[in-house]
Amino acid sequence: GLIERGGNHKIKNQIAMIEEKADDDEIRNAADKVCAAQFIEKLQDGYETEVKERGSGLSQGQKQLISFARAILANPAIFVLDEATASLDMETEAAILQSIREKKAGKTIVWLVKIGNKVARKSAVMHYVA
């Protein structure tokens, strides 16, 4: 979810929270890779849109997409995804997994899913080596 910090609550700052030196192109690229750009660019102020307390005004799925964009931008060595796509459709979920795979060299992904039809597909620990 969204974690507010330092009084800077714009969507672009929420995405760049971990990678504070990221430029606008890097932020937009991360959002695009997880399908967040589609809803962000429809907002009146786009990436400059102020995020209300606890992300009110955004759907749970939109909050998840912002969190995924943040993770893609940060490019961590380990991705831990616990019910991370529960509020997303299958197409968006597939795009997010593809984005993670693109940055896969040396990455470990722990994907925990408790939803019946997804358990067989995603209940796994994956480790990618360059």
Image (tube, rainbow, N blue to C red):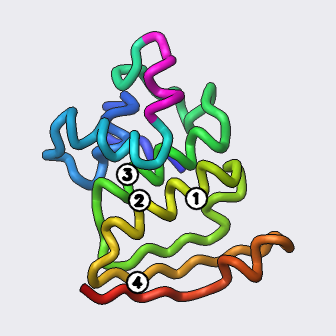
Give me the residue at 40% from left, 48% from top. Answer: 33
Please name the residue that numbered disc 4 is placed on.
108
Q: Is residue 113 above or below residue 71?
A: below
Q: Is residue 50 above or below residue 71?
A: above
Identify the element where label 2 is drawn: helix
Q: Which mark is residue 70?
A: 3
Name which residue type carries label 3. Arg
Nearest to the eye among marks 3 and 4: give it: 4
Determine which quarter of the picture holds residue 53: top right
Give me the residue at 77% from left, 75% from top. Answer: 114
Give me the residue at 48% from left, 38% from top. Answer: 36
Name which residue type carries label 4. Thr
Does residue 45 appear to the left or right of 94 in the view shown? left
Distance from disc 1 to disc 3, alpha carbons, whole Å, reads 17 Å
| Residue 54 at x, y percent in the picture | 56, 38
Name which residue type carries label 1. Ala
Distance from disc 3 to disc 4, alpha carbons, whole Å, reads 17 Å
Identify the element where label 4 is drawn: strand
Distance from disc 4 to disc 2, alpha carbons, whole Å, reads 14 Å
Q: Residues within 10 Å of mark 4 (few under 14, many from 20)?
A: some
Query: Residues in magenta?
Result: 37-44
Lower sequence index among marks 3 and 4? 3
| Residue 127 at x, y percent in the picture | 41, 88
Please name the residue that numbered disc 1 is placed on.
94
Identify the element where label 3 is drawn: helix
Q: Residues within 10 Å of mark 1 (few under 14, many from 20)?
A: some
Does residue 110 appear to the left or right of 21 in the view shown? right
Name which residue type carries label 2. Ser
Distance from disc 1 to disc 2, alpha carbons, whole Å, reads 9 Å
Q: Are marks 4 and 1 in contact (CB under 8 Å)?
A: no
